[in-house]
Image (cartoon, rainbow, N blue to C red):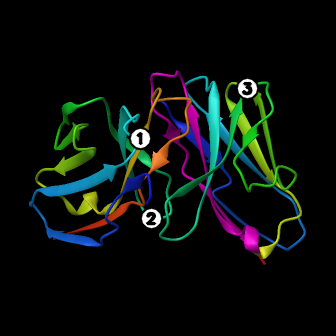
């Protein structure tokens, strides 16, 4: 079993819909959680990062962490065609920065105009 | 802030040549830099972690003599693929960390094709 599980998709939704992206994990030591967006042939771009459980909102994006269920989510409201990309969850145990990240496999998302 | 620049973005070269990829943190000092490799439709695979002025720490299965990493300053790390072969063709991505309480920021990657 992988440490981090993420549905690879592909996921297609109509423009304007709410998108829900999820990851589950098995290592209860993980405390730092990140979501990256990766466009084709580009490097990952940091979207959101959270520590421990709870919600964090930034514009159209909301990140949720439920440590009791070992489950994290990223919600995208009012989805736009420009949101079409691969979304990677990542997590670590000790700190955000100089520790090796454990990634999900990424979910390929397409927003249909 | 936290911009990481990678150069070149694309390299095509003949088998047997060595290729150097640069990773620069443009607006911060990167205490730690990471090098990843990514195959099509797959997630990132960590190759090595480097700290300024120290030898890089390589992940299991990564040949340190094949993939030479130098982190000579707080804003520059280089990855040299020595005597490259077609199986080394891949997308190589670096990331930098400003402080331990900030996440990694990634460059835009280098697409390496060995003919």
The chain that hosts pointer 3 is B
Q: Nearer the viewer, residue A7 or A84?
A: A7
Q: Height in image: B71 above or below A102?
A: above
Chain ID for label 2?
A: A
Report crowding for label 2: few under 14, some 14 to 19, many 20 or more residues within 10 A (C-alpha): few
Q: Residue at x 64, y 35 (%)?
A: B33
Horizontal side, residue A19 vs residue B62: left or right? left
> Which element is circle 2 on?
loop
User: Marks 3 and 1: in contact by CB < 8 Å?
Assistant: no
Whether residue A112 can be seen here? no
CB atoms of marks 1 and 2 within 8 Å: no
- Magenta stretch contains residue B95: yes
Q: From the viewer's perspective, tell me whether residue A41 is left or right of residue A31.
A: right
Chain ID for label 1?
A
Numbered circle sitting on residue B52: 3
Determine crowd level at label 3: few under 14, some 14-19, many 20+ residues with C-alpha closer than 10 A: some
Mark 1 highlights which residue? A91
Disc 1, SS: strand
Look at 51% across and 29% down and name the residue there: A97
Residue displayed at 54% across by 24% down: B98
Q: Is residue B69 magenta?
A: no
- x and y percent of residue A2 in the render? 44, 57
Q: Nearer the viewer, mark 3 or mark 2?
A: 3
In the displayed structure, would residue A75 be above or below residue A80? above
* Range of residues picked out in magenta: B87-113
Say which of marks 1 and 3 sits in front: 1
Label 1 – label 3 distance at C-alpha: 24 Å
Tell me the quarter of the picture where residue B102 sits. Answer: top left
At label 1, counting other C-alpha atoms closer than 10 Å, the crowd grade (few under 14, some 14-19, many 20 or more) is many
- Mark 1 or mark 2: which is in front? 1
């Amino acid at each position: 079993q992988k440490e981090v599980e993420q549905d690879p998709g592909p996921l297609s939704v109509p423009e304007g819909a709410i998108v829900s992206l999820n990851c589950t994990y098995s290592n209860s030591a993980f405390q730092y959680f990140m979501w990256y967006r990766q466009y084709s042939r580009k490097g990952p771009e940091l979207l959101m990062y959270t520590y421990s459980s709870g919600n964090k909102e930034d514009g159209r994006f909301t990140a949720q962490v439920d440590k009791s269920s070992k489950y994290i989510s990223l919600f995208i409201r009012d989805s736009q065609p420009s949101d079409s990309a691969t979304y990677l969850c990542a997590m670590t145990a000790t700190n955000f920065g100089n520790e090796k990240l454990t990634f999900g496999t990424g979910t390929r998302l397409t927003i249909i105009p | 802030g936290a911009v990481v620049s990678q150069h070149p973005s694309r390299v095509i070269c003949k088998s047997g040549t060595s290729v150097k990829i640069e990773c620069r943190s443009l607006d911060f000092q990167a205490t730690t830099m990471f090098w990843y490799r990514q195959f099509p439709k797959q997630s990132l695979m960590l190759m090595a972690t480097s700290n300024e002025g120290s030898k890089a720490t390589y992940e299991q299965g990564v040949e340190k003599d094949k993939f030479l990493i130098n982190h000579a300053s707080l804003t520059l790390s280089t990855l040299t693929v020595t005597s490259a072969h077609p199986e080394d063709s891949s997308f190589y991505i670096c990331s930098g960390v400003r402080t331990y309480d900030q996440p990694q920021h990634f460059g835009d990657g280098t697409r390496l094709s060995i003919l």
